[in-house]
Image (cartoon, helix red, strand yellow):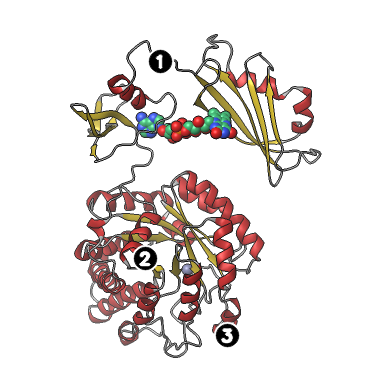
């Protein structure tokens, strides 16, 4: 199955009352352990990689390993999440690498250490949501700050200090309204790392009642528990038995997580337990078989030990048994080439052939385009989409009865120059310049950002009149240029749009 956005899995978990373990990876064996556990328990999975993991494994290795997991296990829906993105740019680079979900952790400043203020958190998170959602990528935010440090990320708060940074339920509600995040990580007393609590946690340090209060206020937001390894004593003991030196530590008891799942917790981050399992297994081989030196001799048991922990969590959180029930398939960025029809009924679509050379001939790795069968097919490929036109040819108006008109729209998004006096909310429409039938617009957004552009109707058929030139000509009009001169281009693009009015009715 292609990778899916995390939202798909969390919505399914919410509808069916279970939680999903979000498991961190850095290498092939960890990905294999998770996938083996998922296959054995029929579980959908969230695989996450931190910034540290991305630099350790390098994005390209990580991307191909995850794609290998998807190829080998087509029945397991996999969401790939950036864990603790420290800044919007980190989230965007993850999206560019094919992550289907990102966490924008604006609870800390971009250094990943200093607790931020609420306004900063809202600003960066909202920005990421806007970009990510436009690309079908889910976003997790965080409000309140956790204790401990994970992969160099974290304020390093002690158990005592972390109490002062617990999530405020009213603020959480406001944060979700202002940012539109899909999932929200909350601080309820857990922390990253192996040393979460100095004794088995009770209600005064692990605030499960806070989860219940947040869930009451945000019944439709997926809550996330970070730092939620259980730190099983038997795993700590194995590590120490074979030469490790871990101090006594206590994690989050499984029953507490299960209580959270009853109250809106849908994603539970587990990393430490897997690290313990791997380390214990490797130490055991080293201690018992000092003569061994083939990495497979210790990586295999390590992978096996991690798989067992993953399986236990998948079963305990309730995600086991659900992989084949998640029905949504997302094929982002794959072109549809044809409609599939039976008689006068549309039965689905055909996707583009994969692995063809520049001339369209099957090359190495050729895979014919997949057919997707559906009870209902909704076509939305734009005003001059090829599939929409096929549909029109088959079932639309008879030839000669159309009055179709469209335009090419081209748009700039700019940072206005310092001297611009344009206020956010300004709407400016122009007509008749630089040609009688060209329409122009300029909209001013908050933070000195403006979008502006022109529409050039399709009945302008001269090849030398390009939309790009019209736009440049248009914006040099003195009325506009005085606001734009010295501004900075953020991005630009063009697309078709349907035109109506006098000619298009
Ligand atoms: C510069 C500009 C400014 C505009 N401003 C406004 C405005 O202020 N207010 C307003 O109401 N409207 C505005 N519009 C019009 C509005 O954007 C369009 O009417 C609207 O986006 C059309 O939506 P759609 O979903 O039908 O098509 P689109 O938004 O064009 O979406 C079609 C999607 O289908 C994908 N696609 C196409 N073919 C295939 C294929 N074979 N396989 C897979 N995917 C495919 C495309 O990549 C695209 O993502 C503007 C348009 C432009 C160009
Ligand atoms: Zn975390």
Q: Nearer the viewer, residue 86 or 106?
A: 106
Q: Secondary structure at mark 2?
A: strand
Nearer the observer: mark 3 or 1; the answer is: 1
Q: Residues within 10 Å of mark 1 (few under 14, many from 20)?
A: few
Q: Is mark 1 within 8 Å of ligand 1?
A: no
Labels 2 and 3: the sequence-earlier one: 2
Q: Which residue is mark 3?
A: 160
Residue found at x 30% / y 72%: 313
Give coordinates of residue 501: x percent, y percent: 55, 20
Q: Which mark is residue 22?
A: none
Q: Which mark is residue 402?
A: 1
Mark 3 vs ligand 2: CB under 8 Å?
no
Rendered location of residue 274, percent (x, y): 34, 72
Q: Quadrant of residue 17?
A: bottom left
Q: Residue at x 79, y 38 (%)?
A: 420
Name the front one of labels 1 and 2. Answer: 1
Residue 325 to residue 489: above or below:
below
Residue 64 in view: yes
Q: CA distance from mark 1 to mark 2?
A: 54 Å
């Amino acid at each position: 199955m292609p990778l899916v956005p995390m939202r798909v899995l969390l919505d399914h978990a919410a509808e069916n009352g279970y939680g999903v373990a979000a498991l961190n990876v850095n290498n092939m064996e960890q990905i294999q352990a998770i996938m083996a556990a998922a296959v054995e328990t029929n579980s959908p999975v969230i695989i996450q990689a931190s910034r540290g993991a991305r630099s350790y494994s390098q994005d390209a290795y990580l991307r191909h390993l995850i794609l290998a997991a998807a190829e080998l296990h087509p029945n397991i829906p996999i969401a790939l999440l950036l864990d603790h993105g420290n800044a919007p740019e980190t989230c965007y680079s993850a999206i560019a690498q094919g992550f289907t979900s990102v966490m924008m952790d604006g609870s800390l400043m971009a250094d990943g250490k200093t607790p931020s203020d609420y306004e900063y958190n809202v600003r960066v998170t909202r920005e990421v949501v806007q970009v990510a959602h436009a690309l079908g990528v889910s976003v997790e935010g965080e409000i309140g700050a956790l204790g401990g440090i994970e992969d160099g990320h974290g304020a390093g708060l002690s158990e005592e200090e972390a109490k002062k940074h617990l999530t405020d339920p009213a603020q959480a509600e406001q944060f979700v309204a202002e940012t539109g995040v899909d999932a929200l990580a909350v601080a309820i007393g857990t922390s990253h790392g192996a040393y979460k609590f100095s004794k088995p946690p009770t209600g005064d340090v692990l605030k499960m009642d806070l989860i219940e209060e947040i869930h009451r206020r945000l019944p439709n937001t997926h809550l996330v528990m970070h730092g939620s390894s259980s730190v099983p004593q038997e795993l700590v003991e194995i590590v120490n038995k074979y030469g490790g030196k871990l101090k006594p530590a206590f994690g989050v008891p499984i029953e507490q997580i299960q209580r959270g799942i009853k109250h809106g917790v849908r994603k539970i981050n587990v990393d430490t337990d897997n690290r313990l399992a791997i380390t214990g297994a490797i130490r055991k081989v080293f201690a018992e078989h000092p003569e061994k030196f083939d990495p497979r001799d210790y990586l295999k048991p390590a992978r096996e030990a991690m798989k067992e922990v993953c399986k236990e969590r998948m079963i305990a959180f309730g995600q086991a048994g659900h992989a084949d029930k998640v029905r949504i398939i997302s094929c982002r960025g794959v072109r549809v080439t044809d409609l599939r029809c039976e008689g006068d009924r549309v039965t689905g679509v055909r996707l583009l052939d994969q692995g063809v050379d520049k001339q369209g001939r099957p090359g190495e790795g050729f895979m014919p385009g997949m057919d997707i069968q559906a009870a209902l097919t909704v076509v939305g490929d734009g005003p001059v989409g090829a599939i929409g036109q096929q549909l029109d040819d088959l079932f639309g108006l008879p030839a000669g009865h159309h009055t179709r008109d469209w335009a090419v729209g081209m748009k700039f998004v700019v940072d206005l120059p310092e001297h611009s006096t344009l206020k956010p909310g300004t709407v400016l429409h122009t007509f008749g310049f630089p040609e009688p039938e060209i329409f122009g617009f300029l909209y001013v957004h908050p933070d000195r950002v403006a979008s502006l552009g022109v529409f050039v109707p399709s009945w302008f058929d001269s090849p030398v009149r390009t939309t790009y030139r019209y736009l440049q000509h248009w914006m040099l009009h003195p009325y506009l240029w005085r606001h734009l001169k010295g501004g900075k281009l953020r991005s630009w693009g063009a697309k078709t749009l349907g035109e109506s009015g006098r000619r298009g009715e």
